[in-house]
Amino acid sequence: MYTYRFIFILITELVRLVITSRFVPCFLAPSESRFFSLLSYAGSLFLTSIAYIFFNLAWLNLASTALGLILISAAYSGSLKKRAQFVLFVLSISCIIDLSVYSLLGPTFDYEDYSESASILSLLLLLAAQLIARRILPDSNERELTNRYWWRYSITLIICITVSLVLYTDRTISPMSLLIVCGGFLAVNLVMQYMLDGLAAASVNETENLALKDQIRGYEREISLQEMNQERMRAFRHDIKHHLAEIKALAERGETDMIAGYIRNMEDTVNESEQLCNSGNIVIDTILNFMLAKAQDKNIHVNTKIAVPKDIDISAFDMNIILGNLLENAIEANSLVQEPRIDLKILYMNESLLIEIDNTYSNQIIVKNNHLASSKFPADGHGYGIRNVRKIVDKYTNSFDLRWDDTIFSVKILIKL
C-alpha cells in the first residue's frame, strides 16, 4: 500500500510539473542549458513529492510548491520581477484549485490522508486553467511591468494565496461558498494578468515608437542635408562652363594667382559634396554618405564594397532604419577602439540584398532574455536599434545573423526581394 501511494504521488507530481511548465512561456524565455533545466525540474519534483508522501500538511505543501516553482523559474531566462510574477501566479492558481477540490469533494474530503481522487481532480483543473491561461495570455516574456504595477499585482496574488490557505483550513465554511470564492479568485487572476500584459505591451510599444520617431526625424534631417549637398554639386556641374570661361579669361590676362585662387574655391565646393558612396542608388548613397562621413569624422577607417542596381524593391524608410541603425551602432562601438574599422558590404544578387557589416568594438556585449541589450547608461530609451532592424527585415523573407568574438562584431542580413 505504501509503495502504491509513493508511485501514485510521484506520477501525479510529474504530471503536475509538465502542466506547470506550460505556464512558463507567458512569463519567461527558454534557457540555453538543458541540463540545468532538467536539474531544476528534478529538484522541484523531489521537494513536492517528499512533502506529500511524508507530511501532507497544507502549509508545508504550499511551501514545497513555492520552492519548486522558484527552482523551475531559475531554469529560464528573465528578470527577477518576471520570475516572481511566474511563481506567484502559478502558486495562486494552485491554491485556488486545491480550495476548489475541497469544496467539490465536500464531506468525503479527508484532511489527514492523501486523496487520490483529490489529486486527479486537481490535475484536471490545473490543466484546464493552463489551457485558459495560454489561450488568453500571450507569450510576454519580453515585456516588463513597471514597479508600480508589479507591486500591486504581487500584493494581490499574495493576498489571494493567504486567503486561500485560511479558507482551506477553516472547516466551517460551506463547500458552495468556497466554490464561489474560488471562481471569483480565478477570474480575477486571469483578468488581471491579461490586463497587465496589455499595459506592459502598450508601454513597450510606446517607448519603441518614441525612439523610432526620434530616429526617423533625425534621418529626415540627414537626408535633407545630403540632398542640399547633391543640389550644390548639380549646380556646380551646371555652372562648369561659366567657370571654364572665367579661368580662360584669367589665363589670357596672365593672372595666374587669381587662377590658383579660383581653382581652390572650386576644389572646396567639390570637397563639400564629395561622395563616399556612388552606387547609383540614391537612397543607399544618401544614407551611406552621411553615416560614413560621420565615421570618417571620428577617424574610423571604412572599407566599402557596394554593388546595387539603381532601383531595388525596398522602401527608403526601411533602408533608413536598417542601414542607419546598424552603422550608428558600428560607429558607437568604435568609440574606444585604438584602431577603429568598419567593413561594409552591400550586394544585390539573385533578387536578394546582402548586407554585411563588420566592426571593431571594445565595450561589453550584454545579452538579456536572448536579445542584445544596450550597454549605455541609463538603459532607458536605448537598445532599440537591433530590435527595430529586426522588425523591418521581418517584413521580408530574410535571414538575420549576429556574431562576435573578442574584437569584431558582425551583422549579416539577407533579404529576399
Image (cartoon, rainbow, N blue to C red):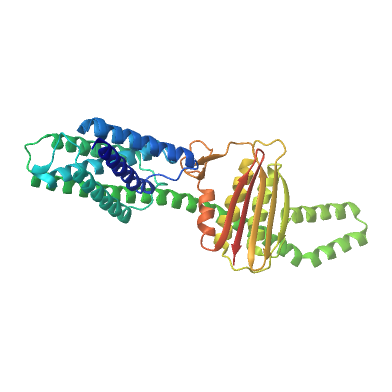
Is residue 352 in view from this perspective?
yes
Is 285 left, or right, of 181 in this rendering? right
334 and 20: which is toward the camera = 20
Q: Quadrant of residue 44?
A: top left
Measured from the top left, where is residue 102 in percent x and y? 15, 43
Vertical arrangement, residue 184 with respect to residue 173, above or below: below
Vertical arrangement, residue 241 with respect to residue 295, above or below: below
Seen at 84% across and 65% down, the residue is 245
- Image quarter of the C terminus: bottom right
Measured from the top left, where is residue 86 in percent x and y? 34, 41
Vertical arrangement, residue 346 with respect to residue 91, above or below: below
Is 366 left, or right, of 302 in this rendering? left
Is 208 left, or right, of 101 in this rendering? right
Seen at 88% across and 51% down, the residue is 257
353 and 268: which is toward the camera = 353
Measured from the top left, where is residue 386 in percent x and y? 54, 49
27 and 247: which is toward the camera = 27
